[in-house]
Image (cartoon, rainbow, N blue to C red):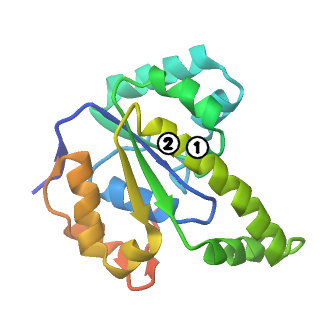
Amino acid sequence: MLNTCTNNLQIIVTGSQRGGTTATAVVIRSLGIAFPNGDDLHEDAMLFANMIDENWDEMKSTIASYNNAHMAWGWKYPSITRFPTKLAAALPLFSNPVIIHVWRDVFSVATHRMKHNQETSLNQELKRLQKELENQIASIEHCETVCPVLHVSYEKLITYPVEQVLRIQSFLKIQGDISNAVSYIKPGQYQSWPTK
């Protein structure tokens, strides 16, 4: 049975870099949700740049084109909630936004980032994450007043994939089989989305 989403939704997937947003986007995409203009990591850098630059007219036009092409679609970018003021200004441009915020153990995030940046240290990354978390919490507090928010634990997703995929499916009101989505999640890790 094909997955179907009967709601006009704009699904914003965010969290910390190296924090599990890609795994979550893979699940959502495998449930049948498009991520237009997304790269191999499902990230739409253009929408993010429009938000950071406060290019609201361009952002509104892009959102309208995505709405015309898809009943429901996703926008994944890890750093969205690091900018609470800009996100608050961007949300009214969406007709029916929902947010999925992914959380991951900060030690795991810090050590994973260190693998990609040899010039940093554990303490430096933990301090950066402390500031990021403060901004993320401020963003989520505002978002929860204007749209639905689902909190997802990366650790729980890769440990209890069926339970967590069902949570995401229920939140998005998607009907259909979850076996494909669950197949991307392996014990302790996830499988990347196949590239063309």
Q: Position of residue 117 (x, y in %)?
A: 81, 70
Q: Nearer the viewer, residue 148 or 166?
A: 148
Describe residue 130's horizontal placement relative to residue 76 as left or right.
Answer: right
Q: In the structure shown, which secondary structural element does the residue marked by tag 1 occupy?
A: helix
Classed neighbour count for the residue bearing mark 1: other residues with Cα under 10 Å, few (<14), some (14–19), many (≥20): some
Describe residue 104's horizontal placement relative to residue 83 as left or right.
Answer: left
Taking 102 as reference, is 172 above or below it? above
Residue depicted at x 71% and y 26%: 53
Residue 12 visible in the picture: yes
- Residue occupying the far top of the picture: 57
Describe residue 194's horizontal placement relative to residue 58 as left or right.
Answer: left
Q: Nearer the viewer, residue 101 or 144?
A: 144
Taking 168 as reference, is 160 above or below it? below
- Please identify the quarter of the rendering in which residue 11 is found: top left
Q: Position of residue 97 (x, y in %)?
A: 38, 33
Q: Position of residue 190 (x, y in %)?
A: 44, 75
Residue depicted at x 19% and y 46%: 173
Q: Which amino acid lies under the numbered mark 1 shown in the image of this protein? A: Ala
Q: Which mark, residue 116?
A: none
Q: Position of residue 86 (x, y in %)?
A: 63, 30
Residue depicted at x 22% and y 63%: 166
For label 2, the residue is 141
Classed neighbour count for the residue bearing mark 2: other residues with Cα under 10 Å, few (<14), some (14–19), many (≥20): few
| Quarter of the picture holding the N terminus | bottom left
Q: Which amino acid lies under the numbered mark 2 shown in the image of this protein? A: Glu
Q: Are discs 1 and 2 less than 8 Å apart at CB?
A: yes
Residue depicted at x 40% and y 57%: 151
- Please identify the quarter of the rendering in which residue 51 is found: top right
- Please identify the quarter of the rendering in which residue 23 is found: bottom left
For label 1, the residue is 138
